[in-house]
Image (spheres, helix red, strand yellow):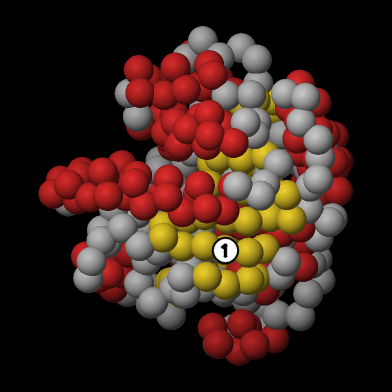
Amino acid sequence: MRVCMLTTSFPRCPGDFAGVFVYNLALTLSERGVGVEVVAPHDGHAPRCETRGHVRIHRFVYAWPQRWQQLAYGEGIPNNLRHRPWAALQIPAFLAAFLMAARRICADCDVVHVHWAPLAWLGLALRRRYGIPVVISVHGTDVRSIPSFLIRPALARVDAVVASNLETEALLRQLGVTEYHAIPLPIDEAAFQPGMEAGPVAEELGLRPGDDVVTFVGRLNAFKDPLTLVRAAPLVLAERPQARFVIVGYGPLAGELRAAVRRWGIEQAVHLVGARGDTGRFLSLSELFVALSPVENAWSMTIVEAMHMRVPCIITRAGQTERLFTHRENAYLIPPEDERALAAAILRLLSHKEERDRLARGTQTLLQRHGRENERIAQRTLSLYRTVLDRRGADVR
């Protein structure tokens, strides 16, 4: 079977966070014999074509000179348009180049798997030309930030809709989409191995024996709210000076975070390490992981990765969180945007190893109950592909 994936965001180099969940799905399927071709926008110095693992990646250029490409990546297309309205002028060229590249690649594929709701229209154009079924995965921000009249008709016409978490399921129901497939996204299990060696990272951070590491991983933006962790840090350090805070990621709040760290004089305890490709090593040396979104945490891929690494998680009660996680059973739940509650939770868990161990055991039960193993995710995705192919009377090559 050959699958063509269309996405507006895809890692441009090893360690890039952009669209990494799409890459993880492509890699997981390719490791099981599926031929996967990815079509994504070009950016910066990324190669136009490359093969990573068994995944073939094709990046299309939509503006010349190439440094003028301002629509994709960064903070994502919706936020890029808010900050740079003139980038909207690139949309026609973007869509034309995208469709042209996809038509060339999809000609020899069996299924088009589109990521992000607005691209469903491109998928439908390809189905009209080649007669191949279209599967669309929605990921939350696409449905949340784009007017429904632009995406509802396309979602009603594709062959299958996939929701990867509880939030996207709820958003789809609000749009009137009641027939969808709840299939989670895989993680890169090779990069997140429990007990993996973390010596180089510990040395880089200057950690000493006895230091307690609390880790945040994610976009440095209001949706993920890393500022609450920085506000909580002085409260924790006042009682537990050996605590260390690691913030992995990049985004628009990076400057504000650095300024806050300097203002409170906690540079030795708070490490902003930027976007990294070795997140698993940071999790390996962590006593706790925090997910602090005031909007939604279920299922955040960073939470899945931390739980896979058996790191106890402190998670804010936001969105669908409490439908998924149970307080003091598989996570420690706190109110959002409350640095005092966060500091209290950190201090409690750092002081009670038996409670951390209980949470770590609970995460494994939770992951198994919700089918978060890569093999199960791959088989469910392949089963969906076969179903849409059979429905359209297509032969699997």
Q: Is residue 167 visible?
A: no
The local crowd at label 1, few if under 14, some if 14 to 19, many if 20 or more residues have their Cα within 10 Å, is: many
Q: Nearer the viewer, residue 68 or 346?
A: 68
Residue carrying label 1: 57
Amino acid on which disc 1 is placed = Ile
| 28 on left or right of 350 | right
Q: Nearer the viewer, residue 137 or 187?
A: 137
Q: Nearer the viewer, residue 301 or 310?
A: 301
Point 51% across, 22% down: residue: 155
- Disc 1 secondary structure class: strand
| 8 on left or right of 320 | left
| 397 on left or right of 96 | right
Q: Quadrant of the C terminus?
A: top right
Is 90 situated above or below 212? above
Point 78% across, 74% down: residue: 196
Residue 262 % position (x, y): 28, 73
| 220 on left or right of 125 | left
